[in-house]
């Protein structure tokens, strides 16, 4: 990620941190519960990559760990790394529009 963007995000607030955690949790819920039912066409294309190359459970545990640790600049940096991983799964593995990620998974 661009250094200036990371620096800007690292100065973010507790609210931005919590929203990022919730967005990731919404994404993990989609991957684990909704994707197999709502988009079986994506499962055919991406099933092996989702279950083989990417450990969703490990990513979910990392998100929960960040939730328990709370906001700090270091944790915000880790959250941004996790967010980018989720976005890559969405955009590359699932072949979805990057522009729709926030709209789809932002907390409501």
Image (cartoon, rainbow, N blue to C red):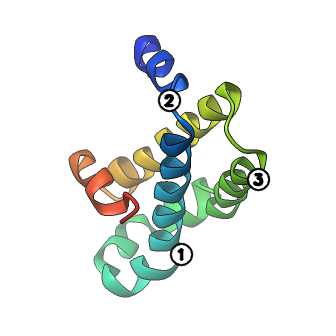
Rendered location of residue 88, percent (x, y):
42, 44
The residue at which mark 3 appears reads as 68
Q: Which residue: 57% across, 42% down?
A: 82
For the residue pair 13 and 100, the one nearer the viewer reads as: 13
The residue at which mark 1 appears reads as 32
Rendered location of residue 69, percent (x, y):
77, 45
Crowding near the residue tagged with mark 3, few <14, some 14–19, many ≥20 C-alpha atoms within 10 Å: few
Circle 1 — which element? helix
The residue mark sitting in front, 3 or 1, is 3
Q: Earlier in the sequence, mark 1 or mark 2?
A: 2
Q: Is residue 102 left or right of residue 64?
A: left
Q: Is residue 91 left or right of residue 27?
A: left
| Location of the N terminus (image quadrant) | top left
Q: Which residue: 54% across, 24% down?
A: 10
Residue 33 vs 11, above or below: the answer is: below
The residue at which mark 2 appears reads as 12
Choose top left, top right, bottom left or bottom right for residue 53. bottom right
Circle 2 — which element? loop
């Amino acid at each position: 990620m661009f250094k200036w963007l990371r620096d800007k995000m690292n100065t973010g607030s507790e609210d931005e941190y919590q929203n990022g955690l919730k967005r990731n949790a919404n994404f993990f819920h989609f991957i684990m519960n909704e994707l197999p039912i709502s988009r079986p066409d994506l499962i055919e294309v991406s099933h092996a990559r989702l279950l083989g190359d990417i450990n969703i459970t490990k990513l979910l545990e990392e998100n929960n760990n960040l939730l328990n640790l709370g906001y700090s600049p270091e944790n915000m940096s880790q959250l941004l790394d996790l967010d980018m991983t989720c976005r890559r799964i969405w955009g590359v593995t699932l072949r979805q529009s990057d522009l729709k990620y926030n709209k789809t998974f932002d907390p409501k």
